[in-house]
Image (cartoon, rainbow, N blue to C red):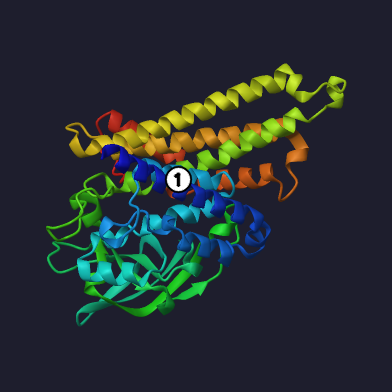
Amino acid sequence: MTSAVISQEEKTLKKLLDDAVKIGKLAEKENAEAEQNANISANVAQAIKDSPISKMMLPKEYGGPQVSLREFGKIVQTVAYYNVSASWLTFLYPLHNTLPSFLEKKARDEIVNQGGLISDIFAALGTAEEDGDGYRISGTWDFASGVNYSDWIGVGVNMQLPGMDEPEVCLPILKTSDLQIVENWDTFGLRGTGSNRIIADNVYVPKERVLPVSRLEFAGRPPEEDYDKDYPFYHIPFFPAFYLGFPYMALGGTKRIIDEFKSATEKRRRLMDNGLLESESPRSQRVMAEITTDFQAAEALMESYITKLEQSRNSDNPTSPAEFFAIRTKVTKICTEIAVRVLITLGGAALYKGGPIEQFFRDILSVATHKTSLYEDSVQAYGMELFGFDSGVRG
């Protein structure tokens, strides 16, 4: 019986990883279009939606494969090897499917059974006014990744729901069709993520589609008593789990950069070395060894991150949010340093626009600029906690 269960789990994961390769290769093939349009193509978005990948972080009651956090990261990393922007959305679309999982069943069923993709913006920049059994939401939010292909979006609003002692950040989940999308995403990297501006003007949302962030952070479960106890996002530190995909993207893109460096170096002859193959040069051999071992160190750090998340359910001494933050950003920092070293080792030949080194270099550095990847912020917070101060970070 056990072997049959394991076999089915392995088949499911293989299907998801095969789909991840297909999505990544399609995005790589259509990357020029994505760079020009500042958005992945409709073909890539549809491939994500059609794959069970888009449903892999839903509770089991909705028929998805419900993978582990480690498997989730592996799928994101696989797509990133081919295209980091596509991996950003292959991460965020199923990730945002976790949000309805914390709503009451009526709203959860409405959103999940509609079958569309979900975006979100946690920044509490909106306003809410009561209107009968719901609220009227207004506001402007930037960085709404993947919103052009989303049917739903959670937006940050500081509001006081019935039963709350004071206002707190909530995520009203709105229909994207009720919003204005302003295509203002014109960036150095991650251009295919289509992280555009959205504007809500007096948009109605029923109260059951308003998610208090405290339900994610402190309760870690939906409001009813009968719920999926095996769901990987319940009863763990939510935000460290919610952010885990960003370093996996960096790892996937960095593995590609290392492979591209090896391939370019094996075929390269430099005049300054009298035509010696670069792979025979101690200089490039040293670089190859160091970036490979640095990459292995980053992978090991990410493995420790996942292990700490898995152990958090039964731990009397849980990992602090700042430690999670510091580990995650250290992984990304190592990846950016590898990308920089490859670029300046290969020299001007790596600078041509649209080439793989140039593309992955821009995208990896752009992952490092996300607010959950900022290294200086993370080490400051972790250092505070190591000396007994409250850093105030969520993860």
- Residue 376 is drawn in which quadrant? top left
Q: Is residue 149 above or below residue 356?
A: below
The residue lying toward the viewer, choosing from 157 and 243, is: 243
Q: Quarter of the image containing the C terminus?
A: top left
At 71% across and 50% down in the image, what residue appears? 354
Question: Crowding near pointer 1: few (<14 within 10 Å), some, many (20+)?
Answer: few
Q: Position of residue 126 (x, y in %)?
A: 35, 69
Does residue 104 sit above or below 345 in this rendering?
A: below
Quadrant position of residue 127: bottom left
- Residue 246 in view of the camera: no
The secondary structure type at the circle numbered 1 is helix
Residue 251 in the image: x percent, y percent? 51, 38
Q: Is 60 on the left-hand or right-hand side of 180?
A: left
Q: Is residue 208 visible?
A: yes
Q: Which residue is mark 1?
A: 14
User: Left of 203 or right of it: where is 43?
Assistant: right
Of residues 358 and 103, the one nearer the viewer is 103
**Residue 139 against residue 98 in the figure, above or below:** below
Q: Amino acid at mark 1?
A: Lys
Residue sitting at the far top: 282
Horizontal and vertical percent for residue 76? Answer: 47, 47
Q: Is residue 317 above or below residue 222?
A: above
- Left or right: residue 348 versus residue 216 is right
Number of labelled discs?
A: 1
Foreground pick, 149 / 44: 44
* The N terminus lies in quadrant: top left
In front here: 318 or 122? 318
| Residue 243 in the image, given as x and y percentages of width and height | 38, 47
